[in-house]
Image (tube, rainbow, N blue to C red):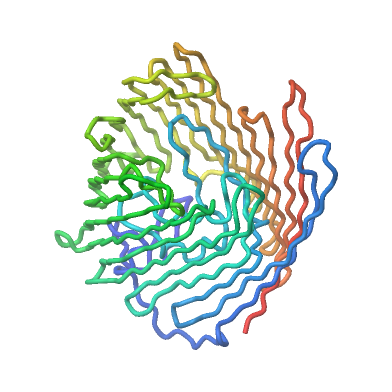
């Protein structure tokens, strides 16, 4: 248990209030005793829901209706194991994705936001130090193909802990969507065994392909050896993992493996990661943005808490990254340096970075219709950043990346902020402006997003998210009203509206109004 007092920039913890230890380190948690006897019945819940609405999917099209009945059920299978069932799964109340720009040759990672997949998702986490380079099970592959939703007919999930063993299993049947995806079965199984005091070994396997491609599978194992008693009271971890995947039409090396050595502590944080990803390692239910490579990363951060007036902590960072192909020829590199990164007692922060970068393009690379020729490119980028403490009624951050970009220059300005005019109202905004000037041509990108939250009461909330980007030339809004009229019942009203700039004139694009009612019966 931990409490944050934002106005004082203070964190208070019930057990193990030591800077080196994270709140999530259960080996350092306290023990609650003398708990009362809770009456949970037999631990079951049925949550039927009905959704209805109408909308216009495109200009000039007639108004079309939409309705669906869904059911979610859970059953406690043991003290720490939960079984879940979903039928005609409905995600109407899920917030839309945040629009982003992409200045790389590789796909972006978008986090999962759907409740059914988020519950117990930590059990499916795999390996140490993989980040977004290798995710063997990525739940967004289920029920989504690109930006198109694929209906889930039925799904089941079991997750929890039996003694020192963590188990997770998920199986889903999706319906066909025109020529995009057939009806197919998808699933994952994950087992992790706790060993020693803080370590674990585990295995993972997936089956099925969202596009119906045959023979799709993945299997792998990982081992994480961790201790919070290294050199007496320090954290230290070593992780090793290996994976293999295949599909009927894939030929080549379908394996991936790597290791991480990590020393994550308050004064010094150092880690070394190496991984190898085969040229045919393309798991159907995973996220692997870059294949056929070796990746090497070394990060070192020194974070002294100095006794200077007004300064709370300094951060001196060095990060080295190198990517080569399987023959050892370099493809990408960058060296991130933070010679100046100070956090003040007020909670405000200032930072400056220098990042030498290199990229080898094997084929032409297109950014906003600007074509970069194949070849080796080397450049240096710089960043200046200022952050205002979140304790203030108005807080935010401004980042300015500038300097080289391939054989030209690029300015990236990112602005984000939060305004809390009252405890019941919050406005959050973000903006990004990229201006590139290259010998092959110039380009500009703009993104704007505004979130609004009204907490009328503990039972009634209104959230709205409005976004604009100049690539699609559209403004999209996602507005969600949630009324918890009963501890077991919720009413959602969702309105989506889009307008588009067509030939320099804003005009209607699409809209949709949905109403969803759900109620839980517990027994």
Q: Look at the picture and state if 92 lies above or below 36.
A: above
Q: Look at the picture and state if 341 lies above or below 210.
A: above
Which residue sits at x=22%, y=63%? Answer: 227
Picture coordinates of residue 149 (x, y %)?
Answer: 63, 51
Q: Is residue 339 visible?
A: no
Residue 456, by quadrant, is bottom right
Picture coordinates of residue 484 (x, y %)?
Answer: 70, 66
Q: Look at the picture and state if 19 lies above or below 306.
A: below
Which residue sits at x=46%, y=39%? Answer: 107
* Closer-to-camera residue (23/126): 126
Number of residue marks: 0
- Kindly give the residue lying farthest to the left in the view shown: 231
Compared across the picture, whether 339 is left or right of 181 comes to left
- The quadrant in which the C terminus is found is bottom right
- Kindly give the residue lying farthest to the top in the view shown: 439
Residue 377, by quadrant, is top left
Compared across the picture, whether 473 is left or right of 403 comes to right
Q: Is residue 427 visible?
A: yes
* Closer-to-camera residue (415/57): 57
- The quadrant in which the N terminus is found is bottom left
Q: Look at the picture and state if 293 lies above or below 144.
A: above
Picture coordinates of residue 178 (x, y %)?
Answer: 67, 49
Picture coordinates of residue 259 (x, y %)?
Answer: 24, 51
Compared across the picture, whether 456 is left or right of 225 comes to right
Which residue sits at x=48%, y=59%? Answer: 208
Compared across the picture, whether 491 is left or right of 403 comes to right
Residue 483, by quadrant, is bottom right
Which residue sits at x=29%, y=69%? Answer: 27
């Amino acid at each position: 248990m931990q409490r944050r007092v934002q106005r004082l920039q203070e964190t208070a913890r019930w057990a193990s209030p030591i800077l080196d230890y994270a709140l999530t380190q259960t080996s350092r948690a306290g023990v609650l005793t003398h708990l009362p006897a809770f009456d949970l019945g037999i631990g079951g819940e049925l949550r039927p829901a009905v959704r209805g609405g109408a909308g216009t999917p495109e200009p000039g099209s007639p108004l079309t209706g939409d309705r669906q009945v869904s059911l979610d059920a859970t059953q406690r299978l043991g003290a720490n194991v939960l079984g879940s069932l979903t039928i005609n799964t409905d995600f109407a109340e899920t917030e839309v994705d945040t629009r982003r720009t992409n200045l790389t040759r590789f796909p972006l990672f978008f986090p999962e936001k759907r409740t059914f997949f988020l519950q117990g998702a930590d059990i499916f986490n795999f390996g140490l130090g993989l980040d977004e380079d290798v995710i063997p099970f990525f739940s967004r592959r289920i029920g989504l193909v690109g930006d198109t939703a694929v209906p889930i007919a039925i799904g089941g999930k079991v997750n929890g802990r039996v003694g020192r063993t963590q188990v997770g299993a998920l199986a889903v049947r999706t319906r066909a969507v025109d020529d995009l995806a057939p009806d197919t079965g998808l699933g994952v199984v994950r087992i992790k065994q706790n060993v020693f005091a803080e370590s674990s070994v585990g295995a993972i396997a997936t089956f099925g392909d969202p596009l119906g491609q045959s023979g799709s599978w993945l299997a792998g194992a990982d081992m994480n050896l961790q201790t919070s008693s290294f050199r007496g009271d320090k954290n230290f971890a070593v992780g090793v993992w290996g994976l293999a995947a295949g599909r009927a039409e894939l030929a080549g090396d379908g394996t991936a493996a790597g290791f991480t050595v990590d020393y994550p502590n308050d004064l010094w944080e150092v880690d070394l990661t190496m991984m190898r990803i085969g040229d045919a390692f393309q798991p159907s239910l995973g996220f692997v943005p870059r294949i056929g490579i070796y990746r090497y990363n070394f990060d070192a951060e020194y974070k002294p808490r100095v006794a200077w007036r007004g300064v709370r902590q300094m951060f001196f960072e060095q990060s080295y990254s190198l990517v080569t192909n399987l023959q050892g020829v370099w493809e990408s590199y960058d060296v991130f340096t933070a010679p100046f990164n100070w956090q003040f007692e007020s909670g405000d922060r200032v930072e400056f970075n220098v990042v030498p970068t290199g990229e080898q393009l094997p084929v032409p690379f297109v950014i906003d219709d600007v074509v970069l020729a194949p070849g080796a490119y080397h450049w240096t980028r710089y960043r200046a950043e200022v952050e205002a403490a979140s304790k203030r009624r108005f807080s935010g951050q401004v980042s300015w990346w500038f300097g080289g970009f391939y054989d030209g220059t690029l300015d990236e300005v990112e602005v984000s902020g939060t305004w809390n005019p009252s405890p019941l109202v919050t406005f959050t905004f973000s903006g990004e402006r990229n201006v590139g000037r290259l010998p092959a041509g110039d380009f500009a990108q703009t993104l704007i997003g505004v979130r609004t939250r009204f907490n009328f009461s503990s039972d009634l909330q209104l959230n709205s998210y409005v976004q604009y980007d100049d690539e699609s030339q559209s403004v999209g809004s996602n507005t969600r009203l949630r009324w918890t009229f009963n501890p077991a019942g919720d009413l959602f009203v969702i309105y989506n509206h889009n307008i588009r700039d067509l030939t320099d004139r804003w005009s209607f694009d699409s809209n949709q109004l949905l109403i969803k009612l759900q109620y839980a019966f517990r027994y």
